Amino acid sequence: MLRKLPGRRRPKVALHIPCSTPLNRTKIKRLMRAGKGMKAAFWRFAHRRYQGRKPMLLTDIAAFVWFTLFALVYGGALAKGWLPSTITEAVVGIVLIGAPFTVGVLHRRIRIEAAKAPDALYRKRVETSRIPISRPRSTISVTSFRQSASPTPVIHSDGGPKSE
């Protein structure tokens, strides 16, 4: 627990979200679900691509070797005092290092998941595609009423419905 130090006051910080319209609960929920949609899209891609074949370990190795090579080259250059002179050089360096690393990590996740069971990618695809329900759905039962057989409900002074 934080103690309040004598003589020091915390600065008041206002959270400002630049937006043309105010955020309501629906917009916030939509923003929070955006990451789940990407996860579902990733597993849909993995299932579609690898449902008929096995993910290869060689792809992981190639991606990590590429990442290591360019990380060492750019890391050594930065250690010797080289700095990128333009934004383009910096972006190219980040892409040459970041893209193979990302591909390697994601392919490794697919390979590990596929090794669990023959239908593991399908199960993962179905699992991420489901939308969680926060509250139980109410069931509505529909019964048929016949006009002649059912009594007409009458509300009495005690508040309960009674039949005539």
Image (cartoon, helix red, strand yellow):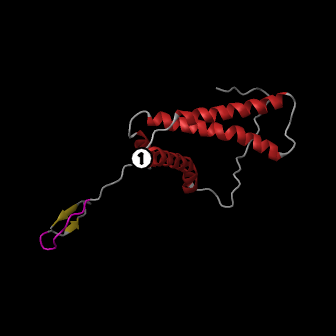
Q: Is residue 21 left or right of residue 152?
A: right
**Residue 78, horizontal then vertical, whole percent:** 82, 31
**Residue 63, horizontal then vertical, whole percent:** 62, 36
Residue 15's place in the image compared with 116, above or below, is below
Q: Quadrant of residue 7?
A: top right
Q: Quadrant of residue 53?
A: top left
Q: Quadrant of residue 115?
A: top left
**Residue 6, horizontal then vertical, whole percent:** 77, 26
Residue bearing the label numbered 1: 126
Farthest bottom residue in view: 148
Farthest left residue in view: 149
For the C terminus, the image quarter is bottom left
Foreground residue among 15 and 28 = 28
**Residue 94, horizontal then vertical, whole percent:** 74, 40
Q: In the image, is residue 120 part of the stretch drawn in magenta?
A: no
Residue found 36% across the figure and 53% down from its top: 137
For the N terminus, the image quarter is top right
What type is the residue that disc 1 sits on?
Answer: Val
The crowding category of the residue bearing disc 1, from other C-alpha atoms within 10 Å (few below 14, some 14 to 19, many at least 20), is: few
Residue found 71% across the figure and 50% down from its top: 16
Task: Say which element carries label 1.
Answer: helix
Foreground residue among 36 and 10 = 36
Residue 58's place in the image compared with 29, above or below, is above
Q: Provide the residue span drawn in magenta.
A: 141-149
